[in-house]
Structures are given as C-alpha cells and as structure tokens.
Image (cartoon, rainbow, N blue to C red):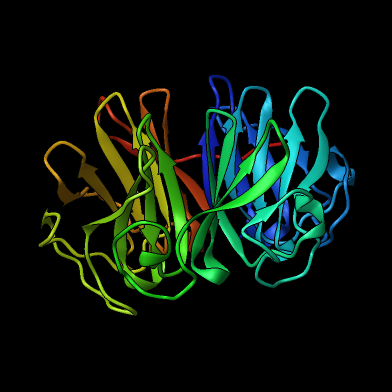
Amino acid sequence: MRFPTRIVASPTHLYVADTGYNRILELGFEGNITRQFGSGNPGHWDARGTEAGFRDPVGLALWKDQLFVADAGNHSIRRVRLVSGDVETLAGNGTCDRPTAPDIAQPRATPMASPLDIAVLNDRLYIAMAGVHQIWQLDLGRGSLGLFAGNGREDGVDGTGSFCSLAQPSGLAVTADTLYVLDAASSSLRSVRFADGRVSTLVPGGLFSDGSADGLGIAARMCHPTAVHADLARGVLWIADTFNHKLRVYSIAKAELKTVNLNYPLRSPAGVCVAQQAVWIANTNAHEILKLDLKTGRLARLPITS
C-alpha cells in the first residue's frame, strides 16, 4: 500500500482507501486482498473493478451492498456496487470549485471542492467538503445534492445555518441523532444535531492551532485530526489524531478525551474503524494497517497478501 487513509468494515471485509495508489482494496480480516477497485493509475472514469479510475480517494462509507467513496482528487463522490463491482459517479463533474447552488438537482453536473470524508444515515450521504469548509448532503433516493451545514467561512463558530462556520472538515461519523465532524484546520471536534442542524464544539482548538492534552472536552486538545469512528457499543468515538501521531478515544457520555497508549509508533494515522472486537488503524505514513485487539490489548501489523 501507499499512504492508506480511511478504513471501514462490513461483517466480512475491510475496505481501505489506498490513496497513494488511487485504488480501494477489499481485504479479508487476515489481510488477504479479495478485490481491487480502481486500476491504480490516476483517472476519472466509471467502469467495473480494476477498469475504473480514481484519483487520491480518501473517505469511505458502507450502506447496504454499496460502498461510497470520496474521490478527493477528482472532486467527486463515487459508488461501488459490491455485488457486481461496478463503479459509478454520483456527484461532481471533476472540477474543483464551490457548488453552483445550495440545492442541486443534477449533482453530476456540479463542481465540488476536495470532499475528504463521507458518512451515511437514512438514505442521506453526508459529505465533508473540506475545500469550501462545509458539510453537504446527497439524497440517495431523490439523487439531489444540498447544503447541510456551514457558511463557507473558515472558522470555528457554533450555531445553525449561515451562523455557523467550519474549518476544513475532514472526518465524519454518525449516530442516530448526531453527525460528528473533525475540523482538521482548527484541530477540533464538532457535532451537528439532526433535529435542528445546530453545530456545537465538543473539543476546541483554533485555526492552525496544535496541542495534545487529555481531559474533559473544553480542556482537551488535538492536532489536525482527520478520521473518526462512532463505536456505539462502547459509547465512544475513536479518533486518528493525525499530526500528534496518536489514537484518541472520546467518551460521548462523559465528554472526555483520552490517549490510547500503544507500544508501537504511529506515523500520521488517517483512518480508524472497529470490527471483529478490534480497532483497525490506517498508519498512513508507514503504509500499513494495524490491528488493536480490544480483548488482549495486543497490537499487530496486518500482513497484506494477494
């Protein structure tokens, strides 16, 4: 692999955005490659399996028998139909710019700006549009694209509608009532309530700030976090604190951030998920996937085999 970023899991497989090689890998939990989506060459074309073209894919989300991809380098949202392996474009015309309107009936005809992550809930695909500091949503039933949160100004202002600002949103996770957002440029954790669209700051930071402190939300600090996974069984968020080279865990009930002590060096991790009683970490700058066994605490490198 080359600079793997986001990672998600189904009951039977791991899916890894192998960003540096412009492809998505389907892996067994022992590390065997079962399928590849994308030729490995940078491009933007729809096709089946290895005949399709991606460019720096990052965000991943699973829904039913579909894998959604934030194809960041192509400024588009793609879908992989896992039964057939067909890859198709759902939104984005391949150019980098602000979408042309807050509500778009033909998403494939509009520009997008560096979508870095996605999350899906109830037929809605939420898109972290880092290039315009906003969250957009794609209605998977109607096929329409609309603005969800953020006024487009790079900032950390809480509120609703045009009264809230985000700063390079790069990581998304959903629960039944909340969308969690990592604002990479302000090193903060934000939440968006689905009921009223209100954006709140849970772990603060500041534009281009750094820090590495555990504690209750207002006292905790991170540095350019980019990936988050909602672990509903444990009531926590797992966070790849990328520039701190750390794995963090945030208790939703206690509003407390802690560092997971690992006897292994992390190098700019940019992906995390939980499956099979383990935390899977994309150790991005080391070009590897790590498995942290939640029962034993054992950390091991996943051997990738074809």
Q: Residue at x 53, y 43 (%)?
A: 7
Find residue 286 and report its horizontal and vertical position in percent. Answer: 49, 60
Q: Which is more toward the observer, 128 or 224?
A: 128
- The image shows residue 279 at horizontal and vertical percentages of 37, 36
Res. 192 visible in picture: yes
Say left or right for 213 vs 198: left
Q: With 221 as the anchor, is 170 left or right in this view?
A: right
**Quarter of the picture holding the C terminus:** top right
Q: How many marks?
A: 0
Q: Residue at x 27, y 55 (%)?
A: 200
Viewer-proximal residue among 53 and 105: 105
* Residue at 15%, 61% in the rendered image: 220
Residue 14 in view here: no
Residue 289 locus on image (x, y percent): 49, 46
Residue 187 on image: x %, y %: 31, 67
Q: Is residue 157 above or below residue 145?
A: below
Residue pictured at 52% horizontal, 51% vertical: 288
- Does 209 sit above or below residue 71? below
Q: From the viewer's perspective, is residue 84 above or below residue 156?
A: above
Front-most of 63 and 36?
Answer: 63
- The part of the image, by quadrant, that contains residue 67 is top right
